[in-house]
Amino acid sequence: MCETCKKPYYITTAIAYTSGKPHIGNTYEIVLADSIARFKREQGFDVRFQTGTDEHGQKIELKAEAAGVTPKAFVDGVAGQIKEIWDLMDTSYDKFIRTTDADHEAQVQKIFKKLYDQGDIYKGYYEGLYCTPCESFFTESQLVDGKCPDCGRPVQPAKEEAYFFRMSKYADRLIQHINTYPDFIQPVSRKNEMMNNFLLPGLQDLCVSRTSFKWGIPVDIDPKHVIYVWLDALTNYITGLGYDCDGAHGELYKRYWPADLHLIGKDIIRFHTIYWPIFLMALDVPLPKQVFGHPWLLLGEGKMGKSRGNVLYADDLVRVFGVDAVRYFVLHEMPFENDGVISWELMVERMNSDLANILGNLVNRTISMTNKYFGGVVEDKKTADENEAKIDQDLKDTIAAAVRKAEEKMDQLRVADAISAIFEIFRRSNKYIDETMPWALAKDEAKKDRLATVLYDLTEAITIGASLLSSFMPGTSKKILAQLNTTKRSLEQMKEGGYGLYPSGNKVTDKPEILFARLDLKEVLEKAEKIQAAQRAEAEARAAGNGADGGTAAGAEAADGSGNGAVGIDLDPKPEITYDDFAKLQFQVGEIVACEAVPKSKKLLCSKVKVGSQVRQIVSGIKAHYTPEEMVGKKVMVVTNLKPAKLAGVLSEGMLLCAEDAEGHLALMIPEKDMPAGAEIC
C-alpha cells in the first residue's frame, strides 16, 4: 500500500515531567505506547507517535535553584536523560516535543489570548487549598480525608491573583460527548470515576495562571503571570503537529488530528478527560478519539523511594537483563486495568522460565538439530502419516489462532494478553518437539523425510512467532529471523493463511546465538544490592550537612521508646569543645505555625516556625514520626544561627532539636513550661 493511501493513526504518551530521572514505572508508559505504535504499523496504518517532556512549573524552579543552575539548564539536562532512556528502550517515536520549544511556547501564548478574548478566561483571585507537588488547587469537597485527591499529600491554604478558565460553560457538552462515545475514556472504571466524582457534581473554574513563580510561559497580556501547567502541557499534543491558533495549520496537523489515542497514567486521567477536551471545545478543535489511563507498575515490596534504595531504573535493569527482557517484563506483567508488580526476583523468574526456557531454548534446539541432521538446510518434504498429520495440523491451528487473538487483543489495548497469545506459539512448538521426537526420527533412515518436515514446521512456527513478536521485543525478533536466514512475515500474510512461506531449501545459521541466558538469582540480588546501596549513599549525601537527616538534631541520652526513660543509652563521645565553641550556637524557642510534607521525599517535613517576630522555614527528617497536622502548634527548640541549606530542593533555615532512642524513634525537644516564641535557650 502506498504511504499516502494508509489510514493515519496518531498516538501520544503523557509528556514526562523534568523533575528528575524517570524510574521503571515512568518508562513503562513509553514502552507500552511503542508496542501499540509498532503493531499499528504492522496493521498498515500511517503511524505518528509523539512523546516528550513537560518542563515548566514551581517544582522545576525550586529544583534548579537547589542545584545552582538556571531552570533552562536544569530541564535541558533532565530532558536529555529522559530521551536517552527512551532511546535505550528501543522506542520508535517520531517526535520528542519539549514544552520549552519556541514554537510550542508561541502557540500557548496565542491560545491563552484567544480564550481570553472570547471570554473563556477571566482574571480574579484564587483563595483555596493548594497541593504543591501536584501544582493544583482544590476545594474542600474535592479533598480525600482532608488531603490532595491525586497524591494524598497535605494541602495548604493559598491566595493568589490568577486567571481562570470557565470550565462549567462546557461541562454539559463534555458529559454529552462521553455518553455519546462510550469508548472515549478507557478502561470503563476511569470513565465512571470522572463522571461521578467530577463532572456530575459540577465543575469549578480552573486556575490557568500563576504569579508566585516565574518559570513558565509568560502571559503576554499580563507579564507578571505565567501560564499554568495544564494549559501549557496539554496543548503539546496539537502544537507538536503544527497546530496554529490563527488557522495556518501544518500538514501534520491536518493529517493526524484528532489523535487516535492518548496513552497516560491513571493519576492524570482527570486532566486529559476533563480539562483537555474542554480546552479543545473552546478552541473549536475536534476531540481525541480515545484516552486510555493505564495502571501503575509497583515495586514488589512496596513503593519505590530513593531514600529506601529501592528505586528501579530502566538503565540499571537493562545492564542486568537486556533491553528486550525488560520490555517483555513490563508489558507482560501489567494487567489491563489493575496495577502490576515488579521486583528483581520476578524479573529473574520470567527471564529463566519464559525467555530462556520457552523461547530461547526452542530457537536454539531447532537450529541446532537442523544443522546436526541436515547441514542447516530446511526442507518441507510434506511427509506425515495420518496421526502425524493431526499433530502437524494442531500446530498450524494454534499458530492461526494466536495470530487472530494477538490482533484482537491489541485492538482492545490488552497488550499483555496479546503477548501471551504469541507465546502460545512457542509453547505449542516445544510440545511439538516432545510429540515428534526428532532425535528418535534421526535414528531411522526411513524417517528422514518426516524429520525434515518436523524441522520445517518448527522453523515456520518460530518465523511467525518472531514476526508477531517484533512489536514487543524488536531486537529479539530481528535476531531470531536473522538466525533463521529469513525476513519478517507481514501481519497480512500471517492472517491470510500464510503458513508455509519459509523457502524450502533455505539454510539457517551454523552458529546459533543464545538469546537469553539463565540467570542465578543470588548473583542478580548481589548486583541489585550494590545498585540499591549506591542509591542509599546518594540519599544520605543529600541529607548530610544539616543535622541528622535534614534539619533535625537527634541524640543525647534519650529514653527507650516507652516514654519512661528506664533504660539509658551510651553514646560514643565526640571531641571536647570549649564554652566559646558552644556559645557560637544560638538556641531559641520556636512555634510551628504551618507544616507540610516535602514533595517526593519519604522522610522530610517542611515547617514554618515563628521565632520572635520572624517566621523561618525549617526542613526536618521526621515524617516517619510526626504528621504535618501534629506539628502545627508545637513549641520546639530551634538552632537559629545554622547556615541555611537546601534539602530536596527546599530551603531550610535552622534545625529542630530531637532526641532519638536505640530503636530510632524521635521525639521533639519541647520546653517544660509554656515559653514565648523567640525565648533564648541557655
Image (cartoon, rainbow, N blue to C red):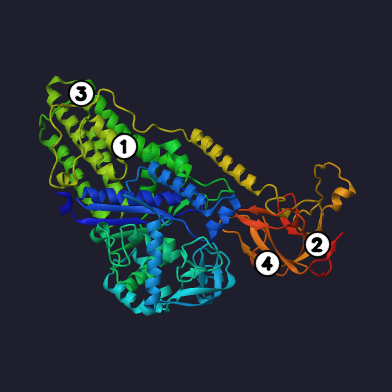
Q: Which residue is mark 1?
A: 476
Q: Which residue is mark 4?
A: 630
Residue for point 27% across, 34% down: 480
Question: Mark 2 is on which residue type?
Answer: Gln
Q: Which residue is mark 2?
A: 588
Determine whether, in the image, residue 584 is placed left or right of residue 158: right
Determine whether, in the image, residue 567 is placed left or right of residue 514: right
Q: Quadrant of residue 282?
A: bottom left
Q: Residues within 10 Å of mark 2 (few under 14, many from 20)?
A: many
Q: Is residue 111 above or below residue 252?
A: below
Question: Mark 3 is on which residue type?
Answer: Gly
Q: Which residue is mark 3?
A: 376
Tell me residue 406's x, y (percent). Answer: 25, 50
Residue for point 13% across, 28% down: 379
Helix or strand or loop: what does disc 1 sit on? helix
Determine whether, in the image, residue 682 is placed left or right of residue 263: right
Tell me residue 499's x, y (percent). Answer: 14, 40
Helix or strand or loop: what does disc 4 sit on? helix
Determine whether, in the image, residue 21 is placed left or right of residue 596: left
Q: Residues within 10 Å of mark 4 (few under 14, many from 20)?
A: few
Helix or strand or loop: what does disc 2 sit on? strand
Q: CA distance from mark 3 to mark 1?
A: 21 Å
Tell me residue 646's x, y (percent). Answer: 64, 53
